[in-house]
Image (tube, helix red, strand yellow):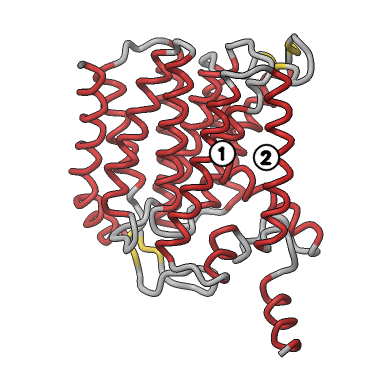
Amino acid sequence: MQYILYIMGSFFITLGLVPLIKKLAYKVGAVDNPCQRKVHFKPMPRLGGLAIYLGFIAMVLLTQPLTQQIMGLVLGSTIIAMIGVVDDIKDISPKLKLIGQIIAACVLVAFNIDVDYITHPFANGVVSLGYLSIPVTILWVVGITNAVNLIDGLDGLAAGLSAIAAITLAIVGYSQGHILMVVLSLMLAASTLGFLRYNFYPAQIFMGDSGSMFLGFNLSALAIMGFAKSITVISVFVPILILGIPIFDTLFAIIRRYFNGQPIFKADKEHLHHCLLNKGFTHKQTVLVIYVINILLAGTGVLLTHITTAQSVLILAVISTMVLWSAQKIGVIGKPLSKRISQQTVGK
């Protein structure tokens, strides 16, 4: 019963704060103006992530003992959220954001939230990382933080995917007896859903970098807390599937830009949601389709924790083939949209 109250607390704190944060966003100039690579057509407040942060952190501090890991999670989350708040207001440089993300990730390492070893996917054993634990942890945290940030391109998309990922982490945590992971994941999901009430299409407020980076950071940290300390042969792939859409979309963006001769960090309109919109799906349909895809990937991640290694390898091979085929078919890793459109025009 107490856990239900914790979850409800996170939800209602965020739900109540969003209208106040919306007014604050207009006052401090945290407004997202339309441009060529965005899909909205009017200025939107974008400080919504602050409400998610406050809803989650408030309940963590009120309900959890201040262990080393909780302190690290709270401190790292605060650093990443404040960087996002500043960016929502002033648009700081990508380099400065990256430095802040690395500092926040280092805080996790300092408070014993790190990847000590990686399970060997094809043998019964683990590989101890030793001193490589620090760079691997930082790479994972920074990578997931930016992956969720990049997927935040449509109303309700990043929030919905993050809630799905958090709930899935809770399910896996429950099956493995990680009660802390369950409670933290569900409180994070509840805070995100409280915000989603105002962010689903048509959105009244955007989460901004204060939300997308905060969610990515916490999902990556919770995955480490839940999986890096448990020795299972296939566990290295489980968090990747749970966070499937942000990870694959970011990976395909890097591949696509590299082979098209574009700067890897240059923003474009070739992400999964852009491609689905180009296929004729509406804004809401696109978001719901991506929700379903990520639920299937997350469900597969849960399944891997209950089957044999051989079965898991077979399923991963099938999933990988389907993901690559689908990405090629939809155009996520194909030619740039402008080239496809020009070729279609010439063909007509």
Q: In this image, 21 relative to 212: left or right?
A: left
Q: Position of residue 301 (x, y in %)?
A: 57, 30
Mark seen at residue 87: none
Depth check: give the residue in front, 43 or 224. Answer: 224
Q: Secondary structure at mark 2?
A: helix
Q: Amino acid at mark 2?
A: Ile
Q: Secondary structure at mark 1?
A: helix
Depth check: give the residue in front, 191 or 297. Answer: 297
Q: Which residue is mark 1?
A: 297
Residue at horizontal 63%, vertical 25%? 137
Q: Position of residue 13 (x, y in %)?
A: 21, 36
Q: Quadrant of the N terminus?
A: top left
Q: Which residue is mark 2?
A: 319
Depth check: give the residue in front, 220 or 202. Answer: 202
Residue at horizontal 26%, vertical 17%? 63
Sequence-first tag of 1 and 2: 1
Depth check: give the residue in front, 56 or 194. Answer: 194
Give residue 348's quadrant in the image. bottom right
Total marks shown come to 2
Q: Amino acid at mark 1?
A: Leu
Instruction: Assess whether mark 2 and mark 1 are in contact (beta carbons under 8 angstroms).
Output: yes
